Every structure is written in C-alpha cells, then in structure tokens.
Image (spheres, rainbow, N blue to C red):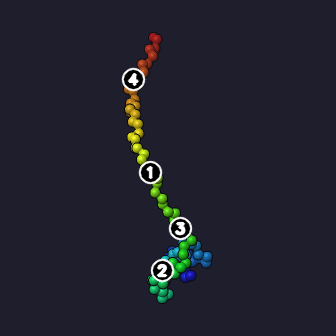
Amino acid sequence: MVETRLPWQSAIINLSPGRVAQSMFSVAEFVRAGFPLMERTQALVEIGTPAQVPKLREKSPGWTKGNTRTKPPRYPTVKKRVTRPKKSPKVAA
C-alpha cells in the first residue's frame, strides 16, 4: 500500500490503522495510479471492515395491552416557614 501522508506528517514504516485508512480513502492516489473510482469502492467492499456488525435496536416494551394508565399521585408543595431573627440575650449591667 502506498502511504499517502499530509505534509506535516512524518514517514513511518509500520502504518497505523489511521494512516492505512487515510491512504485507502485518498481519491487522488487512486486516480494517479490509474484506478477508476468504481474499482476503488469495489476494493473496499472486498476488503471488508474489522468492525462488528451493529446490534439491532429493539423497540422498548412500553405499556402492556389492556393495562389502564393511572396518573401518579400528586403531593402538596412544602413551603418554608418564615424564620424570625433570634432575640439577643440581655446583658446584666
């Protein structure tokens, strides 16, 4: 695989997965090599991906059939009492 790197990236021998992906998805390199865009995508399909297939999302069970929906109980609000300032103790003279 031909390494396609950006100008500020240094050349490395063992390509990291990110560098491999960067080189694979570089359209300019495939056009320069003479591969049309269709062959490039076909090559990607044949190579496949190391990622696992995503799990299917199941619908949540929700309310069971025939179950009556009741509103939750409402409680009265609790209000703070007004605090009065404490009386200061009288000092004996």
Q: Position of residue 33 (x, y in %)?
A: 50, 87
> Hey, what amino acid is under mark 1?
Gly
Inter-mark Cα distance, 3 to 4: 66 Å
Q: Nearer the viewer, residue 53 or 36?
A: 53
* Quadrant of residue 84 within the rendered picture: top left
Q: Which residue is mark 1?
A: 62
Instruction: Name the secondary structure under disc 1.
Output: loop
Of discs 2 and 3, which sits in the foreground? 3
Relative depth, front residue between 8 and 57: 57
Whether pointer 3 and pointer 4 mark residues with C-beta atoms closer than 8 Å, the reply is: no
Which residue carries the number 4 mark?
84
The residue that disc 3 covers is 53
Report helix, strand or loop for mark 3: loop
Q: Amino acid at mark 2?
A: Thr
Determine crowd level at label 3: few under 14, some 14-19, many 20+ residues with C-alpha closer than 10 A.
few
Q: How far separated are the C-alphas under marks 4 and 2?
A: 78 Å
- The structure residue drawn at horizontal position 55% and vertical position 69%, both measured from the top left corner, is 51
Disc 2 crowd, CA 10 A, few/some/many (<14, 14-19, 20+)? few
Single out the mark in the foreground, 1 or 2: 1
Q: Amino acid at mark 3?
A: Val
- Whole-Å distance between the Cαs marked 1 and 4? 51 Å
